Amino acid sequence: MVRSAIKLFLLLLFLGYMMLWFMMPTKLYFEHWLPKIRANSKSTYFGQQGSTMLIYTFPILFIATLGCIYLHLGKKHGDHNVEGRVPTSKLKQPVMVKGPLGIVSWMELSFLTMFVVLLAWSTTSYLNGMFTHIDQMASRSGLLVWEAKLEMSGLTLGLVGNICLAFLFFPVTRGSSVLRLIGLSSEASIKYHIWVGHIAMTIFTAHGLCYLVFWAKTEQLSQVKIGLVCGLGMWATSLPQIRRKMFELFYYTHHLYILFIVFFVFHVGFSYACIMLPGFYLFLIDRYLRFLQSQQRVSLVAARILPCQTVELNFCKSPEVNHGPRSIIFVNVPAISKLQRHPFTITSNSNMDTDKLSMVVKSEGRWSSDLYQKLSSPLPMDGFQVSIEGPYGPPASTHLLRHDILVLLSGGSGITPFISIIRELLFKASSGSSTRIPHILLICAFKKSIDLAMLELILPVSGTTVDISCLQLQIEAYVTREKGADEDNHKPLQTVWFKPNAIDAPVSAILGPNSWLCLGLIISSSFVMFLLLIAILSRYHNSNMVYASSATAGFYMLFMCLAIAMTANATFLWNKKQNRKRLRQIRNMDTPPVWFNNGDRELESLPYQSLLQATNVHYGERPDLKKILFERKEISVGVIASGPREMRQEVAAICSSGLADNLQFESISFTW
């Protein structure tokens, strides 16, 4: 009942916040509501930004804090998603497949349409109000009418662009309670950041061009802002043609967002910047927590070297770290690059492997190739320094059990998310649960037969007694570029063990087992500290000191960073102290854990034989996806595609063709 009441209150608060955005461009808001709010919230300590923080910043931060409490209560009482048979949702079916937006569902298209309507409504309302008395304004300013209209058009575009900026940072806040409340994860929301970013930069560029022309005519060209240049640099390198071919250029250039935000605040003033502050504030907290976690070296115990230029990394982890299927981690290897952090899918299962976290890296780029070469080198290795951010991903309970059959379609290394899904279902099947486990059909396509070695990673760890034969699993493997098996490819897996290092720690949650509660504490306490620092500065500003508006904005930004850093550090150190004893016990392991069979898996073992019996290999052909998906029309089919974009688009087109109503499509992609 408490959680239901919290959820209802959060919903009402969010609807009120969204209504505010629709009312902003109206005369009712500007002439009646806003003056009353400013009059009632006028304070010596918070100045003119007090009312904007009350209206725009406080509601979202309050939602984020209360949402943390809601999620903590759900985690404490074992809240799980409904996993029984439920009807497939038409709103989640793809409606657009090969457009510039990628694969888009009806629900995503609906929300995108509402967002565009909000922008269009705001634009027309602002222009309507500004052009009503444009002649009088032009005469008072000594401008021609067209110059006044150009200036007001530029101002309108800036105001509308700020709406985009207010929502830009929510999708890239990886540990966001706001995203989790609405059922989204950060990796699934990256495309929303891309959409909003393109719209924002289009509007801000038009805003800048209007003022360039206006300033050139009024001899004020020197007022061109650095923020626009930084934004254009980020925008240009984020285009798919550049991002996919030169990812490092995109990644490093994207850090210009720091200068962009700083000069944006200088440009509009801190009071007006409070409109976009809540999303950026939550992003800063998340980014700093990720920074703290990435400074810790984690314990890499072993690596399995596969003959197909693939390596499986195995880390020690604290039992408190629970991750669901398809969760990801960001990995940094300083020996290869001190700055680069790459996302990889976790293949281990937190229920079956309480002290282990594993991931698979296939050599497909320079960074991954360098990693494979270092680990497969015959030279001895005393240690291998690695740091991790995460895990991130959907909650532990997913809707995997809602369908009669799960069709998992993968291409190449796209099979890695399905390893964790299969292991999760294997755990449920072997635990004696009364819930019916769906039949699993894994369709995987590889270029060469040597890549078939990746199928062995599906097998559970040897330390468990789980047998894969208890799962209804059928594997159809397709080798597209070879006509038959290559006997030279049957090489055994190799295992590299690393000596334990005293400074390495198991993978652990940055905020401990009560991470949501700690995050809510950081959000609330840092904001209170931020307000106190603003109050102190405002008090001295009014009495003894005089600051320029840009200097005041600089102080406020510094205070915000200081408050976040102090509260996050305090929470981090407290959790580190609480976990120190448990971490010391794990560090003092004298012998490596028996997680797997050191690559010397017995071919006569029952799990391996069960895997072979469930696998059919097809050489020199591609899977007939239409036949596979449409041959089961009387049962509920969940279709999950992972791999190259073209393959996911093909599957989405089949599922959205209308020839079958029993297909529920889902795409796994990482657009970064």
Image: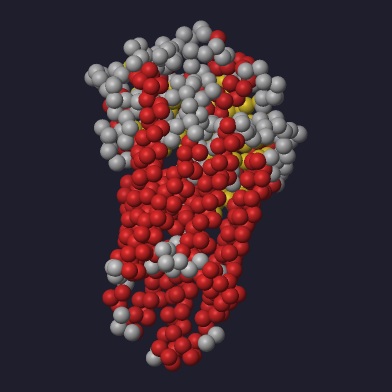
The x and y percentages for residue 532 are: 40, 55
Residue sticking out furthest to the top: 604
Q: Residue furthest right?
A: 634
Query: Which residue is at a point 32% across and 30% down the rendered structure image?
Result: 297
Say above or below: 461 vs 572: above
Quadrant occupied by the C terminus: top left
The quadrant holding residue 372 is: top left
Side of 26 where 4 appears, left or right: right
Quarter that holds the N terminus: top right
Which residue is at 42% across, 17% downward?
490
Residue 145, percent across and down?
45, 89
The x, y position of residue 391, in whole percent, is 45, 34
Q: Estimate the x, y position of residue 260 in percent, counting from the top left.
A: 35, 60
Residue 76 seen in this snapshot: yes
Number of numbered discs visible in the structure rendering: 0
Q: Which of 617 and 495 is in front in this view?
A: 495
Q: Is residue 100 visible?
A: no
Lateral position of residue 617 relative to residue 591, left or right? right
Kindly identify the residue that appears in the image at 64 percent across and 38 percent down.
626
Is 55 situated left or right of 231 in this image? right
Figure quadrant of residue 550 = bottom left
